[in-house]
Amino acid sequence: MTTVSPAARCCGLLRDVLELHGPKYGCGIGQCAACTVLIDGRNTKSCQTPAETAVGKAVTTVEGASGPVIDAIRDAWHRGNVVQCGYCQPGQTLAAAALLAENRSPDDAAIGQWMNGNLCRCGTYPRIRHAHRGRRRDPGRGPRPAAAGRPSRSWR
């Protein structure tokens, strides 16, 4: 069992203690979304989330995210040649999974609203939108929890 300081944030715990490096420490103030994880399926900025609030909850990072929705998102990004540096990809991917869990057929406005706040250093926003437009034809059923005994990890 790991003892954590009450001041510890989820991002630090995931990266420094659990060695899950999908969530990136970007801005530290919840503005870039590079640290996005899913906590009980909800899009969460881990740099601003106290680690103690995640106790007893399902925390999914991009490394452990699986299922038809995640597969469709990853495939759409690959087919759309979206990734350049990849820094935003974990947060972008999980944010898309959270969007699709709430709205299986998002329109351009919904995609834009969910993308807002997920910063891409390379500016591939048009490719991200295009990938999600194409992916809308195969939305899947939402992220599946990680397999038992396998660490969970997370997009936008």
Image: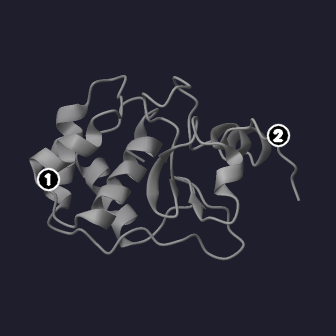
Give, as a three-letter code, the residue at label 2: Ser
Q: Where residue 101 sits in the image (x, y, percent)?
A: 33, 66
User: Marks 2 and 1: in contact by CB < 8 Å?
Assistant: no
Residue at screen point 22% across, 42% down:
113
Distance from the alpha carbon under mark 1 to that under mark 2: 42 Å
Q: Is residue 70 above or below residue 128?
A: below
Horizontal side, residue 90 vs residue 152: left or right: left
Pick the front one: 151 or 6: 6
Q: Residue at x 65, y 55 (%)?
A: 54
Amino acid found under the numbered disc labelled 1: Arg
In the rendered image, the vertical position of residue 56 relative to residue 39, given as above or below: below
Disc 2 marks which residue? Answer: 5
Q: Earlier in the sequence, mark 1 or mark 2?
A: 2
Q: Quadrant of the N terminus?
A: bottom right
Q: Position of residue 91 (x, y in %)?
A: 44, 43
Residue 116: % across, % down: 27, 35
* Above or below, comparing residue 122 to residue 11 in the picture: above
Residue 41 versus residue 149 in the image, above or below: above
| Residue identifier under label 1 | 133
> Residue 13 has which mark?
none
Q: Residues within 10 Å of mark 1 (few under 14, many from 20)?
A: some
Point out residue 44 in the picture as x, y percentages from the top left corner.
Answer: 48, 47
The quarter of the displayed image where residue 42 is located: bottom left
